[in-house]
Amino acid sequence: MTVLQKRGNMKFQLEFHPNPDCMTVHVAKQLTEKAIEMWMDGTDLDRNDEIHSPAPAYVKEIYALDGVTDHISLKRYKLGVSKGKLFSWDDLAPKIVAIMQSYLEPEGTAEMVGQAIMPTIADMVEVRRMQLEPMDFD
């Protein structure tokens, strides 16, 4: 077995956003060849047309978790997910990572790389400012 054939760990990093109900899981393994894939409410997971592709099995499993809501998106090396307000990332994040690892590196383990990325105070202030400013559509 060459080094390239050897199974390894699924390296990941968590990123939390100013919206406390959104999280991104960055991985070192390509998730999609498209610029972005998105499933909005779990009802379109098997849709297959010129714009949409059926969701991978791990996306379907993540959608099935209690607390996962609204959307899941894939970019080349990251998965974005949202949760309901009454649910905790402390409970959901390990389950999401375990599901991804079971598909991406089934014989390996999940290995967190670095600290989780947290929003800065400036990020939070900007989000609040945008919420309070009236929208100008002219």
Image: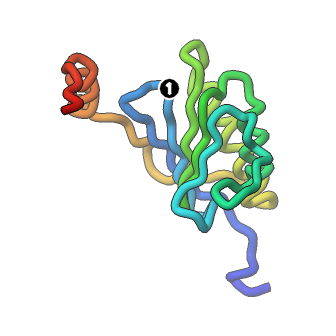
Viewport quadrant of the N terminus: bottom right
Q: Image quarter for residue 126?
A: top left
Q: Count all numbered tags in the image, as a single digit.
A: 1
Residue at coordinates 66% horizontally, 43% vertically from top-left? 97
Q: On screen, 45 above or below 123?
A: below
Q: On screen, 79 above or below 137?
A: below
Q: Image quarter for residue 66?
A: top right
Residue at the bottom extreme, as displayed: 2
Which of 70/119 is in front?
70
Mark 1 secondary-structure assignment? loop
Residue 18: x percent and y percent?
36, 30
Residue for badge 1: 21
Q: Image quarter for residue 85?
A: top right
Figure coloring: rainbow
Residue at coordinates 61% horizontally, 40% vertically from top-left? 72
Determine crowd level at label 1: few under 14, some 14-19, many 20+ residues with C-alpha closer than 10 A.
Answer: some
Q: On screen, 61 above or below 87?
A: below
Q: On screen, 80 above or below 10?
A: above
| Residue type at numbered disc 1 | Asp
Residue at the top extreme, as displayed: 86
Left or right position of 135 against 1: left
Which of 33/97 is in front?
33
Residue 24: x percent and y percent?
51, 43
Residue at coordinates 63% horizontally, 60% vertically from top-left? 31
Whether residue 125 can be seen here? no
Whether residue 49 can be seen here? yes
Residue at coordinates 69% horizontally, 82% vertically from top-left? 4
Residue 102: x percent and y percent?
78, 51
Viewport quadrant of the C terminus: top left
Residue 94: x percent and y percent?
65, 36
